[in-house]
Amino acid sequence: MAKIPSLLVVFQRKNKHLPKPIPIIHVARLSKHYQVPVREAGLRQAARALIQRQHRTVKAVDEISFFIHPGEVVGFLGPNGAGKTTTLKMLSGLLHPTSGQVRVLGYEPHRRQRAFLEQITLVMGNRNQLAWDLPALDSFELQRAIYGIPEHEYRQRRDEFIALLDLQDLVHKPVRNLSLGERMKMEIVGALLHRPQVLFLDEPTIGLDVTMQRRIRTFISEYNRRYGASVMLTSHYMADVEALCKRVIVIHHGRILYDGDLSGLVERFSAYKTINLTLKNGPVSLEQYGEVVSQEGSNASLRVPKSETSRITSRLLTEQAVADLTVVDPPIEDVIETVFNQQAEAA
């Protein structure tokens, strides 16, 4: 992997005052609906369904719109069944949209033109693309042939990716003999050998331990930095999102609830802040200042309304012997849960 940044990255760094480039991904009122057969339980209803079948429409994705610029890493968040994977499949060309428009790199994904497929990749944490009974090196060689990668470029990328992910002792083993984390790293190497400019990553760290998650996050971040690739990431691990994404899109029931900075999500949907403090004189009662989240010895955490933070902080410093005090935003997991709860209440 070359140490020199891509020309796109260099241009953006030196010309920050210029307007943003044309979006590399453009989605307008994109929808995907399914017709699902419906019948009640029982033999009578089963017989009736044979003659007069009824259907209902399931809106997996319902008129969403957004755009992503070159080099952006965007978190695509939502609960199970929100429409995340369906959206990524439409963006990568695996599904044909019901309605709306989508352009990736100037192409319509569902046409699956070779020039388009050579510039994207889709990695799904619960799907395998490597041959199960063969060493990963053999599958890598197959990828080289499929994408027509020149031999010298292929070997350079392969060896650098292997070194970055510390896979030297594993590439000769059959894939079935690898652990989940080792197999996932191999999958990512195989998916990036053709050096795509757009990465669709669907739960790439699912089921992995903390160390393996960190290693994959570092690799994705480094790939983005060196090649200026655009990344769209779904994950239930908020550590992935916080480490990689400055911008997030939150989707629920097929519709977008939020699109903006990660910090803005916390600011908009969090009504509370957390005050962590250490007392000089041991534990004291703190209920008068706010909700006591935890208290162990001299250390305590309080949840207080955002609008009251300054006043309560001043009271604590005046009325208590405080050795240390910090005010922090709530965990991003709590903020996302708040977004979904507000949507459920509105519905």
Image (cartoon, grey):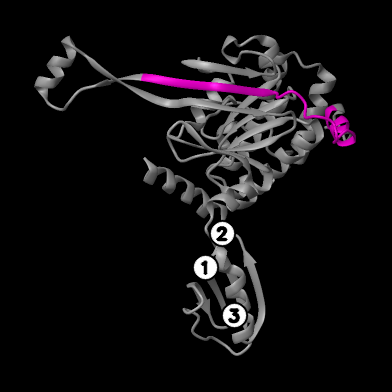
SS of the residue under disc 1: strand
Residue at point 9%, 20% (across, down)? 44
Secondary structure under tag 3 reads helix
Would you say the residues marked 1 and 2 are in contact, meaning their CB atoms lie under 8 Å apart?
yes
| Viewer-nearest of discs 2 and 3 | 3
- Indicate the amino acid at tag 2: Pro
Dot 1 or dot 3, earlier in sequence: 1
The magenta-colored residue range is: 8-34
Q: Earlier in the sequence, mark 2 or mark 3?
A: 3
Disc 1/disc 2 C-alpha distance (Å)? 9 Å
Residue positioned 63% across, 84% down in the render: 318
Q: Quadrant of residue 1?
A: top right
Q: What label does residue 159 carry, if any?
A: none
State the separation of the CA atoms marked 1 and 3: 15 Å
Q: Which residue is mark 2?
A: 330
Point 73% across, 22% down: residue: 194
Residue 303 is labelled as 1
Of the image marks 1 and 2, the number of the one nearer the N terminus: 1
Name the kind of residue labelled 1 in the image. Arg
Work out whether 277 lies above or below 126. below
